[in-house]
Image: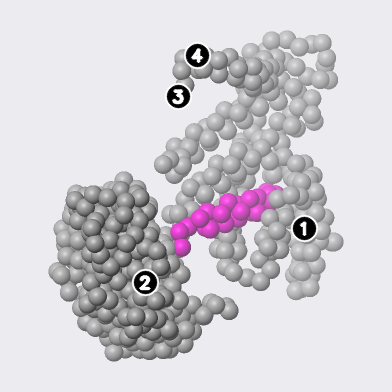
Amino acid sequence: MATTHTRSAARLMMAPSVILLFAWMIVPLAMTIYFSLLRYNLLMPGTEEFAGIMNYQFFLTDPAFFDALSNTLILVGGVLAITIIGGIAFALLLDQPIFGQGIVRILVIAPFFVMPTVSALVWKNMFMNPVNGLFGWLARAMGFQPIDFLASVPLLSVIIIVSWQWLPFATLIMLTALQSLDEEQKEAAEMDGAGFVSRFIYIVLPHMARAITVVILIETIFLLSVFAEILVTTNGGPGTQSTNLTYLVYAQALLQFDIGGASAGGIVAVVLANIVAIFLVRLIGKNLEG
Amino acid sequence: MGSITLRNVSKVFGEAKVIPSIDLDINDGEFVVFVGPSGCGKSTLLRLIAGLEDVSGGDIIIDGQNATDAAPAKRGLAMVFQSYALYPHMSVRSNIAFPLKMAGIDKAEIDRKVADAARVLNLTDYLERKPRQLSGGQRQRVAIGRAIVRQPSAFLFDEPLSNLDAALRVNMRLEISELHQQLKTTMIYVTHDQVEAMTMADKIVVLNRGNIEQVGSPLDLYRKPANLFVAGFIGSPRMNLITGAYAEAKGGKTVGIRPEHIGLSKDAGTWEGTVTVAEHLGSDTFMHVDVPGVGLLAARAGGEFGVRHGDRVYLTPDESKLHRFDDKGLAL
């Protein structure tokens, strides 16, 4: 098909976009690495000087870093668990023929269209607020003391809010996977004497393995960088209880004006994200083959 | 044991009466073929017997037990699907073992039965492969293997050969016939291909629009079609159906004569016509001849009968093999 001539012509024509994309990635990365090696504070302009790995030393020995690291992993893991289990459950329900199927499906997908700051504010003020929120009202109606979610269980609150946003995505992917399952396979399993639970475990779940993998990979990419939900609800607090890496970098740069430290944090976050990515691809990437 | 009896079985989808009412007896050990054009309800009928669809009325009796409301797995039937419906993530071994595993049979017994089935079907070397690594014919055999390990009282085949290429289809046809000889289990086989029906069946059930047109052995149907539909459906190429003066003269509204019962000559005969198409198959030559006043007739001649498009030939029907039909299309 492709002759030598067309191949070199193709390379030539693709070159501008490849170069642009490469620059787009490499320039910010190089600048961040450069800044991370400087003593660079916005409160002391003009005093930038080379500082070696000092920024890294400070960032990695900061107790907030370890809190942020574990919070990040708990946040990602918690949201993944909720969205995948919930997504499969919703997909199974939505796959049943029901009256008003179209509208129900749109309703289920709707949260995905709500921007993170808005949904976080809605949850903060209308659900989780101990005085005005729905949960507080429910608790009082049943005679319990309302829980101040954002103060007493901040990380769980953020997990709930983010899960609510990502559940539609997981449901959507799972539903399409479920609908692509060959009807005859289900019937064959039925004739083979498999009940509903056996059919789910032996036929449906293996069929959805690829979809589950896709959801895990895509959600992990986005969940490692959750920020808006934390900013508008808990501001990372109380203390560092709901601070994740992204928020810690933000706090370093724009609350403490320490660009050097924040850049070092950014590089650490990039390295961690890559470790998670390699780990995930090793663990579940084989599901995407073939 | 595998006798199946249908009593007034009907099936309605919304407004559409797919099967108005069917009575049918299938004896133990019979190879029954449901044949008919697409949309005639043959697959639906099979799915009703399997329990994959609920009947709208009537009873299904399997081995003397009323199984009308029984779950598919409780009917003791095994089905081979058109798409094979193999479980893609399981090895051939797990696929064949699946029904046994669901039945809660112990591991050693499962291994023995799977090994037996694999030997019968020549799958022993492929047990650890995944379905996607197999050829069409092998997949077909795995699907059959999954059915035979359960030792069902009857097998149901839903157009099992339609996804195979022509050469493989002939092979699998023989293999299924051999399997039936070995197992002596009742088999119900759905196809739209009348060649499959003729070659495999003990008993053919010809279906049209949800009604049974005729039930009988392949040769019964070939020799004595009960009506125009069966006459036109069974036999390849199709029977020539002639109306008009010739039919009246022979005492019917329509008369039918099979292509193989028309004598051909280049010199003299009852009808004179022009060859429109001549299909040379080597052993046979099928000719489509336009005869003025009678219509387009198909006729079969030996492979050496050299004619081409536009040649004039003479046709002589073997009048002892004439089929006569009345104005309702029923055989006289």
Residue topped by disc 2:
B241
Label 4 – label 3 distance at C-alpha:
11 Å
Q: Chain of mark 3?
A: A
**Amino acid residing under circle 1:** Met
Image point (53%, 58%), residue name: A179
Which residue occupies the foreground of this view, B266 or B66? B266
SS category of the residue bearing label 1: loop
The answer to whether residue A182 is magenta is: yes
Question: Does residue B42 show up?
Answer: yes
Residue topped by disc 4:
A5
Say above or below: A155 vs B319.
above
**Left or right: where B84 falls relative to B120:** right
The dot on residue A128 is 1
- In percent of width and height, residue B192 lies at 36, 66
- In percent of width and height, residue A4 lies at 46, 14
State the extent of the magenta-drawn residues as a range: A155-183
Label 1 – label 3 distance at C-alpha:
62 Å
Q: Chain of mark 2?
A: B
Image point (61%, 53%), residue name: A172
**Amino acid residing under circle 4:** His
Q: Point out the image quarter for the C terminus of chain B.
A: bottom left
Q: Main secondary structure of the magenta part?
A: helix
1 or 2: mark nearer the eye: 2
1 or 3: mark nearer the eye: 3
SS category of the residue bearing label 2: strand
**Left or right: where A124 falls relative to B22:** right
Residue topped by disc 3:
A1
Say above or below: A176 vs B323.
above
**Amino acid residing under circle 3:** Met
Q: Residues within 10 Å of mark 4 (few under 14, many from 20)?
A: few
Which residue occupies the foreground of this view, B300 or B118? B300
